[in-house]
Amino acid sequence: MALTDEDRLFPLEGRARDLARALYAEIHDLPIISPHGHTDPRWFAEDAPFPDPAQLFVTPDHYVFRMLCSQGVDLADLGVPRADGGPTETDGRRIWRLFAEHYHLFAGTPSRLWLDHSFQHVFGIDRRLSAATADWYYDHIADCLARPEYRPRALFRRFDIEVIATTEAATDDLRWHRMIRDSGWDGRVITAYRPDGVVDPEMAGFAENVALLGEQTGFDTATWSGYLDAHRARRAYFREFGATSSDHGHASARTEDLPQSDAAALFQKALAGTCTADEADAFRGHMLTEMARMSLEDGLVLQIHPGSRRNHSDQVMAMFGRDKGFDIPGRTDYVAALRPLLNAVGMRPDLTVVLFTLDETSYARELAPLAGVYPCLRLGPAWWFHDSAEGMRRFREMTTETAGFYNTVGFNDDTRAFCSIPARHDVARRVDCAWLATLVASGRLTADEAPELARQLTYGLAKKAYKL
């Protein structure tokens, strides 16, 4: 029994379905451009076998363990490492059995689509995961993982990944990227500059991180000018390892363009730990504008990922640390928030700022109109909680009418789960082909335009926007 339907996510109506099939047939095997994500570069540096099925599919994937947690499953029982040093389950088979017993929870979710795609198309499985099949699954996948063709570099080739970007903190030493480069392997794995730890005064260890930034670059980061020069030097270092973008995960989309004297004074308060919450937000906002100006100097694409109320559970944060499934979307303003940055640099066509959102209500009201007029702006794809088939469809419906297709940047998978990459891209390709087919069938697009648009949405727009 196939786990995935050949016509999944295509329109139900005959002509539109036929059109979607034809479009998909032309683009489904294009190489994967993965310009933003969180896969571990160590995988590709060491090319060691993945340890076991649980550590491949369950323990690193917050989409998986947050659903199980919602039904009362302890994260420690899923092998999620504890920040407080407490015990966690280390037996991969036990973790897998617990996952399999609760697999029914994923019915109708994008995670189910991704997982079933991986099981069938990566591991050749033709039976559904359940408590009854858990051990068979575990043994089958474990046997595959022991083979050379299932090591990270081999899967990279099998998935036909042309380029993948990981995301590292500004102070990361990039040792794994250096190992990849020195190994002579021709797989293209690049980094992206993530400076949150050295631009967010509310992040734990901010002053220490800034001091480390100074040690790494040789600039005096106790001064405002030295701090900015250190960012420039560090960005240049990241570019040596292929970086074409920076990434900024702020709580809001707020930007500021402060006088340099005011920014310097605010920076000193940030170092001293005396910023109010509003001052910390203002500093983050000003640094987005500074990063945009640096992008005009060095060409890095500026990605803004706002709107996540991160680490919502104090208890989980204390026990397990950051990024453990308790980041929750919040309402986000873009029109007023981005105005200072856009007044400073928004009319520059040589700057690319990619906007993401977790607030779908802003698509038609704010994001599409902004991207539909400012030369620097592009819209990132439906992201995180909205990278579902329905979310991707809503994104196209609400943005195309104002921003068109060419003010978007295709798709990125934004994942830590390696085997989900081809699955996520397949969902995006199918949804886009279905949307284009609907436009053709309803007379809003001609049949000869659709194939080129499908290719752009699948491959060309991401490659161009991220300078890949």
Image (tube, rainbow, N blue to C red):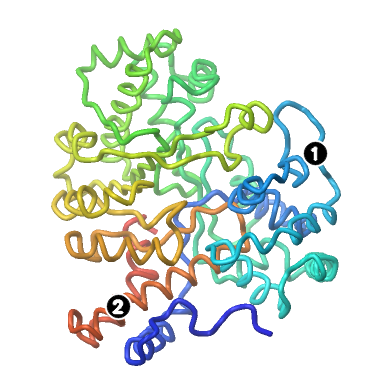
Q: Which residue corresponds to the image point at 38% horizontal and 39% vertical from the top-left?
A: 330
Q: Which residue corresponds to the image point at 18% horizontal and 84% vertical from the top-left?
A: 443
For the residue carrying disc 1, how many other residues have a C-alpha within 10 Å: few (<14), some (14-19), or many (20+)? some
User: Along the line of sight, which residue is nearer the eye, 74 or 439?
Assistant: 74
User: Along the line of sight, which residue is nearer the eye, 117 or 246?
Assistant: 117
Q: Which residue corresponds to the image point at 19% horizontal and 31% vertical from the top-left?
A: 340
Which corner quadrant holds the C terminus? bottom left
Q: Can the viewer see residue 406?
A: yes
Work out whether 251 lies above or below 99. Answer: above
Q: Which residue corresponds to the image point at 39% horizontal and 61% vertical from the top-left?
A: 391
For the residue carrying disc 2, how many other residues have a C-alpha within 10 Å: few (<14), some (14-19), or many (20+)? many
> Would you say 298 lies left or right of 430 here?
left
- Find out whether the residues at labels 1 and 2 contact each other: C-beta distance under 8 Å: no
Work out whether 174 lies above or below 116. Answer: above
> Would you say 196 lies left or right of 446 here?
right
Q: Measured from the top left, where is residue 164 in percent x and y?
A: 51, 57
Q: Secondary structure at mark 1?
A: loop
Q: CA distance from mark 1 to mark 2?
A: 47 Å
Which corner quadrant holds the N terminus? bottom right
Q: Quadrant of residue 410?
A: bottom left
Q: Measured from the top left, where is residue 298 in percent x and y?
A: 32, 41
Q: Measured from the top left, where is residue 383 in percent x and y?
A: 42, 53
The amino acid on which the numbered mark 1 sits, given as a three-letter code, is: Thr
Q: Report the residue marked by disc 2.
A: 436
| Marker disc for residue 88 | 1
Q: Secondary structure at mark 2?
A: helix
Q: Can the viewer see residue 181?
A: no
The amino acid on which the numbered mark 2 sits, given as a three-letter code, is: Leu
